[in-house]
């Protein structure tokens, strides 16, 4: 009979863990001796990561009551790793609907300015009506005709006087509202401009108002009277009876005044294009002959269809074209010098601080 002591082969082949009496006492300091929490199925997994239990299942829902859920032992800020929504817009950029809303507000303000101008013209209609007769009276004096003659203007239809009222009120309201409409439009486009472009806004707005006023004054006091005087002299030379429609006269005077004021804005456009490096002064000088042709076409479209008026319109426009080349070149050089001086000033500041 084989011996049954502790050194027997049967005892050595039998696992010691199966016998609770032969099991080694547990070391309380060992991390693998920690008991698994209630509900844990794998004690070895828990003992390997004593801080938390890893959840290998992708299908397990995130439940804070589940002890195998890692989010139950993590801080609230890091428990959820779901993709968050896009960060809020912090650069002040506007979406399409925001731009549409701003455009709607700008359009409402512009229409309100136009209506206000028309109301003011209507309240003082008699004064505006007499003021707009100045080019005709001036032309009559130049042609040697009594300006107080009662047969200078006529209405040829029963409702012709209403056309006069509407045209004077409309064009007068446009003339009064144009500065405000320009201000509203600039306020609409200003947020989308760069810092360099914004620096040009104030001088550009003041220059636009000045050029518009210059064109309107030139047309009202010089261009229109000269054109009407030529027409009166030709009528008298050909022994034709002068019967001008009042609606046609007021439409021509207001259109000529506003159109000339707008045309006189083109030098400002050329100056801005040169400062922003869109075109150069050398390119504009190279196409000077083409510019002359364009000026003559514009003069033919704006001025009355006769040589004197077209010449009076084209000559100032060409002078303004040449002035725009000089001013644009000087402003361009000034901007280049200012931009080149900024990096140098920054280096000097760094050297001084160092």
Image (cartoon, rainbow, N blue to C red):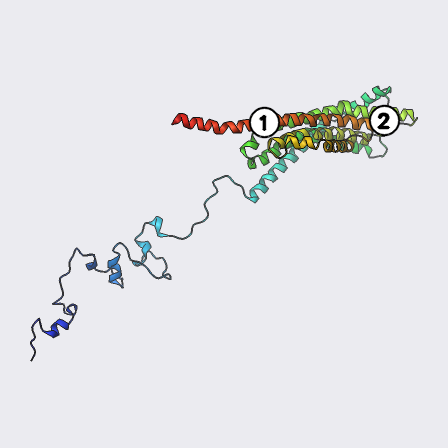
Which of the pair 216/276 is nearer the observer? 276
Whether tag 1 and tag 2 are in contact, CB under 8 A, the answer is no
247 vs 239, left or right, is left
Q: Which residue is mark 1?
A: 333
Residue 53, by quadrant, is bottom left
Q: Give the quadrant of residue 148.
A: top right
Picture coordinates of residue 99, whole percent (x, y):
57, 41
- Is residue 258 rendered to the left or right of residue 42? right
Task: Tell me: 235 left or right of 37.
Answer: right
Residue 19 picture location, percent across and down = 14, 69
Residue 231 is tagged as 2
Total labels: the figure holds: 2
**Residue 147, visible in the rendered structure:** no
Local crowd at mark 2 within 10 Å, few (<14), some, or many (≥20)?
some
Nearer-the-camera pick, 294 or 34: 294
Quarter holding the C terminus?
A: top left
Q: Is residue 308 visible?
A: yes
Work out whether mark 1 precedes mark 2 in sequence or the reverse, and give the earlier one.
2
């Amino acid at each position: 009979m084989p011996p049954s002591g502790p050194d027997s082969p049967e005892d050595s082949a039998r696992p010691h863990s199966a016998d609770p009496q032969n099991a080694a006492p547990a070391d309380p300091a060992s991390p693998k001796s920690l008991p698994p929490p209630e509900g844990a199925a794998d004690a070895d997994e828990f003992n390997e990561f004593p801080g938390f239990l890893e959840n290998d299942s992708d299908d397990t829902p995130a439940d804070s009551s589940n002890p195998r859920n890692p989010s139950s032992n993590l801080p609230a800020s890091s428990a959820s790793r779901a993709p968050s929504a896009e960060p809020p817009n912090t650069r002040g950029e506007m979406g399409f609907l925001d731009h549409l809303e701003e455009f709607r507000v700008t359009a409402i303000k512009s229409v309100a300015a136009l209506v206000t101008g028309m109301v003011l013209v209507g309240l003082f209609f008699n004064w505006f009506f007499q003021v707009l007769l100045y080019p005709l009276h001036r032309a009559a004096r130049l042609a040697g005709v009594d300006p107080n003659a009662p047969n200078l203007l006529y209405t040829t239809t029963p409702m012709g006087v209403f056309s006069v009222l509407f045209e004077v009120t409309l064009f007068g309201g446009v003339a009064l509202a144009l500065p405000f409409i320009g201000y509203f439009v600039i306020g609409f486009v200003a947020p989308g401009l760069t810092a360099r472009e914004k620096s040009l806004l104030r001088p550009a707005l003041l220059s636009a108002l000045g050029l518009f006023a210059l064109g309107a004054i030139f047309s009202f006091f010089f261009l229109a009277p000269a054109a009407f005087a030529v027409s009166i002299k030709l009528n008298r030379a050909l022994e034709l009876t002068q019967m001008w429609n009042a609606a046609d006269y007021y439409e021509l005077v207001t259109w000529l005044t506003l159109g000339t004021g707008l045309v006189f804005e083109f030098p400002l456009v050329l100056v801005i294009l040169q400062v922003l490096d869109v075109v150069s002064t050398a390119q504009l000088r190279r196409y000077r002959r083409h510019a002359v042709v364009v000026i003559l076409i514009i003069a033919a479209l704006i001025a009355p269809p006769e040589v004197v008026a077209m010449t009076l319109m084209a000559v100032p426009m060409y002078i303004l074209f040449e002035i725009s080349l000089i001013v644009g070149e000087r402003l361009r050089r000034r901007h280049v010098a200012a931009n080149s001086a900024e990096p140098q000033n920054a280096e000097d500041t760094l050297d001084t601080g160092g």
